[in-house]
Image (spheres, rainbow, N blue to C red):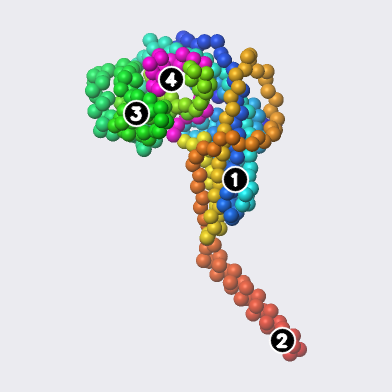
Amino acid sequence: MAATLVAAPAAGPGAAVIRSAPAYYAVTKTVTLTNTGNQTAYHVDAQVTLLPPATRYASLQLTGESVVPASVSRDTYGNTIGHFAWAQLDPGQSVTLTFTYTAEVWAIHYRLDAVQGPYETTGASYRTYTDPRLEADAVDTGAPALVALDRSLAPADAGPLDRAQAYFDWIVGHIRYNYSLVPAGSALAVLKTRLGICTDFAELFTGMLRTAHIPARLVDGYVVNNGAGEGGFHQWVEFELPRLGWVAADPTWGVDGYFAALPDDWHIPLYVGGRPDVNVTWQYVPGTAPYIHIQYHYTFKTLAAAPAPARRAALPVLAPAKSTAVRQHGRALPATPWWAVGRAWLAALWHWITGTLVTIFGRLA
C-alpha cells in the first residue's frame, strides 16, 4: 500500500492569516493515453502532477490510485510528480490512470501588518520566482512596457505590498474579461488588447510583480462555484511578502475583494507554474509515426462533512470525459552506432569463414 501524500497548509505564524471553517470536497482525476498512430510507441513515459505545493487555504490529499507510480519527484515549482512507464503502446492501445483525492478548503484573509523587513534575496524561492527566464513567453518579466507601467503606478520607494496592491488595482480597473473565452496569450498581449481570460489576468499580474522583483507564481486550479453555481478550471496568483510568505490574489475576481484574500472556500489548487498537468514522451522506429493522445478530466463533489480516513487501495479505471491539449513529445529510437554494426558484421563474417573452413577440411578428411 502506497504512503499517503498530503499537500498540507504551509507552515507560518498562525496570526498571519484568518481562516473560515473548512469546506470538504471529493476529487477524481482520470488520465488516458492512447496510441492513435498506426505504429508502436516505445518507452512511453508519463509525468503526471499528483499534488501542488502546500498552501494556507487548501489541503489536498491523494487517497488512492489505480496504478502506483514507479517513482515520485518534485519539480521546480514544488509540485509532486508521479512517473509512470510502459515498455510500449501498440496502435490503438490505451492505458488509464485514476486518482482520488479529498480536499479541505478555507476562505482566507492575510494579516498584512505581519509584513516585515526586506526579502531574503539569496533564497531559492526569491531567485526562482523573480527570474525573468521563468515562463518568459507568458509573463514577459522585465519587458520595457511592464517596466514603464510598474514605474507609473508606484513610487521608487514603495514597498512590495504597496506595489502589489497598485498593480492589482490597475489590472482590475483597466482589463476587461473576454467572454468569448479567447485568451490573449501573454502579459504583453493582454496589456495591448486590454481584454483577456483568467490566464491573461494572472500572467499580467505575475509579470508586473516579477518585473518589480516581487516573487510571484501562477496557480492552476478549479473553482467549484463561480458565484453563479457553476464550476470550472481557473488560474490565479500567489505572491511572496517578507516574513508573511505566499499570499493569494485573484485579479480576475478583483472587484470582489480578492487581493490578499480568497473570500470563498471554492478555490482548489491543482498545480503551480507554467507546466502541463500531464507530460508524455515516447520513442519510435525511424520512418514510423506513432502518436500518444492524452485525455484527462476531473470531477468534484461537495461533501457535507469531513471524510473519514481513506484506505489506500487500487481503483477501477474510468472512461475519459475531457480532452485537453497538453505537452507531449516523440523521438526516434537511438541509431545503432557504427562500431556495433561493424562488430556484428565481423562476427557474422568470422562465423561464415570458420564454418566454410570446417566444411572444406571435413570433406578433405
Dot 3 and dot 1 residues touching (CB under 8 Å):
no
Front position among marks 3 and 4: 3
* Disc 2 secondary structure class: helix
Front position among marks 3 and 2: 3
When the figure is inspected, residue 345 is found, relative to residue 248, above or below; the finding is below
Q: Earlier in the sequence, mark 1 or mark 2?
A: 1
For the C terminus, which image quadrant?
A: bottom right
- State the CA–CA distance, disc 3 to disc 4: 22 Å
Q: Amino acid at mark 2?
A: Phe
When the figure is inspected, residue 337 is found, relative to residue 361, above or below; the finding is above
Q: Position of residue 49 (x, y in %)?
A: 54, 34
Residue 126 visible, this angle: no
Q: Which residue is mark 1?
A: 34
Q: In the image, which residues are magenta?
A: 245-274
From the viewer's perspective, is 227 left or right of 113?
Answer: right
* Disc 3 secondary structure class: strand
- State the CA–CA distance, disc 3 to disc 2: 89 Å
Q: Earlier in the sequence, mark 1 or mark 4?
A: 1
- State the CA–CA distance, disc 1 to disc 2: 59 Å
Front position among marks 3 and 1: 3
Residue 195: assigned label: 3
From the viewer's perspective, is 21 left or right of 17?
Answer: right
Q: Amino acid at mark 1?
A: Thr
Q: Which residue is mark 4?
A: 248
